[in-house]
Amino acid sequence: MKNKKENREVSRLTTVLALSTLISAFGSSFQYGYNVAVINSPAPVMQQFYNTTYMERYKTEMGQNLLTLLWSLSVSMYPLGGFFGSLMVVDLLQPCNRKGTLLFNNIFSIVPAVMMGASEVAKSYEIIIVARFIVGICAGLSSNVVPMYLGELSPKNLRGALGIVPQLFITVGILSAQVLGIRNILGNSAGWPLMLGLTGIPALIELLLLPFFPESPRYMLIQKGDEKKAKKALQRLRGWDDVDAEMTEMRLEDQSERAEGRLTVFSLLAQRSLRWQLISVVFMNMGQQLSGVNAIYYYADSIYSSAGVNENDVQFVTVGTGAVNVVMTVAAVFIVEKSGRRLLLLVGFGICCAACVLLTIALSLQESVSWMPYVSIMCVIIYVIGHAIGPSPIPNVVTTEMFRQSARSAAFMVSGSVHWLSNFTVGLVFPFMERGLGPYSFIVFAVICLLTLVYVWVVVPETKKKTFLEVSQMFGKRNKVEIKLGDSDLPLKDSKEDPEKVTAF
């Protein structure tokens, strides 16, 4: 009896759960990170290809403004595709389920991989821009579905750690692209098409292996009503037969949501009981992307060159930064369940804010002080450390925990849309901002980090080791509602019942 009770409280990481996590994260999240950084190192030779192709077509050299615009489009079409991928989440999740959506999504990776790999032979930079949009759709879907899938597979004591694994694979993808982008490997005039095309390999691996692993038990029970399959999947994931406690918790969640049904985005926006959860998700995702992290990933080589780093050393400094990112994300996996989500967000945004201010000062003084380039490098590394432990991995974890089953798909559609639109804005605007504001560009990012930190401090509660139902109750007071079994919008001030009777969970 004691062992059964302990099982209900603390679940271990089983082989099935670990492999489900690794395969879905590698097949989907790895590609997200890889495509963020893949065009950074080979940017000069790719721009030369753009110029040469233009010259062959029009017998004149491409102007600098047109080249900057085309390159900005090559960068920013990826997050724009991510935005459209996020809009597809709700429509795909219902007929295809979590696992099926991830499998279907591989189409949006394999097709553009072939397109980008053939772009030089076709002598078309337009193919690259279109393919970047399509692979962005893949990233937009996976960045929403993978955290949702893993959050629903995981027991509550492992949900934070496993929720960070997708971000870990994003950082590994970034590092892999940085390593392959070294000029002696693939970051050269001969290797860049292959480098862009390699993004299809993780998709093929996921397509072959993921069908052998379980679907989300919560999806099977709450949205499909198939208790038998849900229990079987849960038993495989937990490694024991006694899953009655979790099944009961899922039934309670199902019961509490029957009146609501599956929420669309519009009905989600109208739900008073979810108002502050939704606002928090918007703020965290805007803060995550507008804080400047992707400006660093997209244009790391350019930033280091501006900081005075020797041209031959830039690629190795960039790889070193990617390695630091991976190490700190691994650290976040191990500390998130002890430190909590809220603390990591506060510390992370605080570090990023300070690093942006110091980087601005360092870049401003680099021409007058000989050792300032080293300070600039340290500021970027410190920024990456801060972002890796909080702002990068935590928002998706918290989004999963803030919403119950009926609202989760729509919530991820909103958060993903905000995430990718903000990402698109940074990718498109930063080259022009860098040319116009110079070193003061990072002051804008510092202000955004500070505002997000203040919001998290005031509004966002700690969600670690809470059930989805308990998190809903935590927001009840701020939303001025008290959630009952089957009810969603009962004002606190109007409730006259005994709190123990009102509380359904």
Image: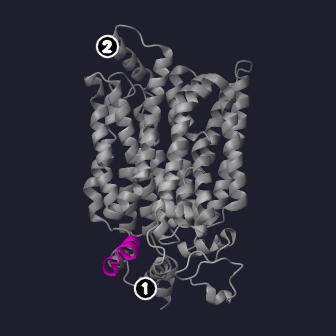
Pointer 1 and pointer 2: residues touching (CB < 8 Å)? no
Judge whether residue 481 can be spotted in this image: yes
At x 67%, y 45%, the residue is: 449
- Regarding mark 2 in the picture, which secondary structure is present there? helix
Residue in the foreground of this view, choosing between 170 and 371: 170
Query: Could you say where residue 160 lies in the image, as x and y percent from the top left?
Result: 53, 63
Residue in the foreground of this view, choosing between 372 and 45: 45
For this orientation, the residue located farthest to the top is: 59
Disc 2 marks a residue whose amino acid type is Arg
Q: Vertically, is 274 above or below 23? A: below
Q: Earlier in the sequence, mark 1 or mark 2?
A: 2
* Residue with the mark numbered 1: 244
Residue in the foreground of this view, choosing between 117 and 469: 469
Judge whether residue 154 can be spotted in this image: no
Query: Could you say where residue 127 lies in the image, as x and y percent from the top left?
Result: 32, 30
- Regarding mark 1 in the picture, which secondary structure is present there? helix
**Quarter where residue 458 is shown:** bottom right
* Residue with the mark numbered 2: 57
In the rendered view of the protein, which quadrant contains the C terminus?
bottom right
At x 41%, y 59%, the residue is: 90
Query: Could you say where residue 186 lies in the image, as x and y percent from the top left?
Result: 36, 29
Disc 1 marks a residue whose amino acid type is Asp
| Residue 1: in magenta span | no
| Residue 228: in magenta span | yes
- Which portion, as a residue range, is magenta? 218-229
At x 74%, y 30%, the residue is: 361
Relative to residue 230, is residue 446 drawn left or right? Answer: right
